[in-house]
Each structure stands twice: as C-alpha cells, then as structure tokens.
Amino acid sequence: MSRSGFGMAKVVLAIAVVASLTALAGYFYFLRGENEKSSASSASAHFYNDPKTSIAEIGLKVFYAVPKNHEKDFDRGWRGTIDAALLKASRFHALQLRGFSKLNYEIFPRPFFLENEDIFYNSTSTDRGNPRGLIAIAEEVDRRVFRKSGDLYNQEFAKFKDGEYPVMGLIYEGVGASGGVIYETDKELTQEEIAKRLGVPESIVFIVDVESSRGFFLLNHEFLREKMLSVLGPTYLYHELAHSFGLPDREEGGGAAQGNDIMGYGRRESIEVMYIGKDLLKGLGIIN
C-alpha cells in the first residue's frame, strides 16, 4: 500500500502500557481503523494476528532526534552507532522471520534538531516509557519531514515503496523506550468509544496527528551509545520495533516480564542469542 493511503482521517492512539524490566521502557499500542488495513492476499508474513496486513516488506525511516538544548553537545558519531544497531536488527529480523519479511531501513541524513528543549518531551517518570516524548516527537517529525509544507521536507526521503509497511523510528537524545501501532478511523469517536472498541482503559487512549506511518517507536540513544548498555541496544531497538507490527510484551499480572524470548526477559540479552517465540511467529504467519 502506498503512503497516499494514509493520513486523511482522525488518528487515534491507544497505549497499552506494561511495566518493564527497566524504568525506561513501555509498550505502546497504536490504532488505525479497519478501513485502512492492507488488503494483502497470500503474504506469508503479516501483522500480528492480522493476515490482511502484510509485512513482507517493512519500510523503516529512522531519525536521530536531538532536543534544542543539546544542539551543541549531541553525539557526533550518531550515524555509525545507529547504523550498526539497525544492521544487527535487520539481520535478526531476516533470520527469525525466515526470509518472509524484509526490513528496509533508511536513516535521515542529519540530526533532527527538535523545536523544543528536552523538558518539553520528557516524562517525569519513565516507568511508562515516556509516551509524551513518543507522541510529541513523532508528530513533529511527521509535520516537518513528511509533509510538503515542512521545513525539512524531502520528497525522496518521505516516500515509502509501494507495498511497504511504513514505520518511523526515533533514536532520542533523551529518556524512554516505547513502540506501537498506529491505526486510523474515519469516524469521530471519543476516547471512551475507542477504548471500549479496543477493550483497553480510557486512560491509555490518545489523539495523535501522524499521517506517514503505520507504526513507530522511540529508543533512548544511551542504549546504543553507552558502553554498559550498548550490548543490549540492538535488542531493545528490535523489541520496540516489533511492537510497531503488533508483537506484544510478554507480561504477568502486575506488568512483570515473562518468557525468555526478545519480547520478554530476553530483551536483557544480546541480540545474537535472542529469538522470537514460536507462538509469536505463528501469529505473524511464519509458521503454522
């Protein structure tokens, strides 16, 4: 489906948050209405538990987002760090999805200097993954890069290939780690109505304005840059990316992680020793 198929209707964001193994991560579940779902026919790889939405090819546009007050002290080696993590994530994706899904990624060629200081985007508590930052930064990127009126609009970069499942990745010089799915509805529904339709609490439903993508995620840049965390960086990156095509966190009551794969306890391990559980692969159409 081309990018032109998105963006005219009211965009609604629902976030199903679970406690994570660190205070920096959260699971976000984003929505667009059923009328906007892809009509993929026989693709082997599809959105989790939704065979109609193909993920045979995922188009990932990645941004290094830097708050205004960090313009002079941002990481000069950002591109190499991000590219190395994405390469590991794409190899993991190809291996785990057995070649039925291809992850195409493109990094925005310059740091994306945000319009505001980090206090505008950061949450006071990150045990919910910094939803404020995820929403605000994604909306700003969408407005400035993907829309023709944007000051950073680039026609070639803003394009997704026909048939790609479009995802926005935000490597943020700040706090948080979150990921999820965006849907769209052509009806003027209240937050209460959306929550009831999805079977989630009203408190985790938000209205957003993102036209370019079907999924997106945010990852604190420290996971890729800091020596003590960098071994886990690609794992966390893929964990949040996986939310963008529907994979859920594995959780027990109270939000504690369970399961040893990358969507559970495995997010604390190197991506080289990680895997996606068979039940999740089944939900993605990879195995029967």
Image: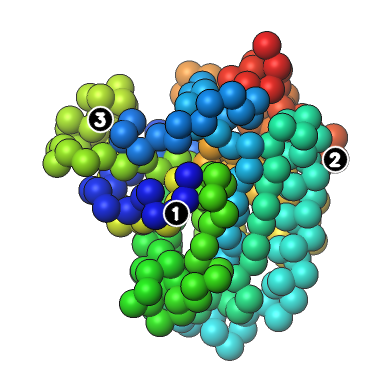
Q: Residue 95's x, y, as percent? A: 81, 35
Which disc number belongs to residue 3?
A: 1
Which disc number belongs to residue 195?
A: 3
Judged from this view, the residue extending furthest toward the right is 272
Q: Residue 229's x, y, as percent? A: 74, 54
Left or right: 190 with respect to 182? left
Amino acid type of the residue tagged 1 in the rendering: Arg
Amino acid type of the residue tagged 3 in the rendering: Ala
Q: Earlier in the sequence, mark 1 or mark 2?
A: 1
Q: Earlier in the sequence, mark 3 or mark 2?
A: 3
Viewer-proximal residue, 70 or 248? Answer: 248
Identify the image quadrant of the C terminus: top right
> Dot 2 corresponds to which residue?
272
* Residue under the point 74% across and 47% down: 90
Q: Residue 75's x, y, as percent? A: 68, 77
Amino acid type of the residue tagged 2 in the rendering: Glu
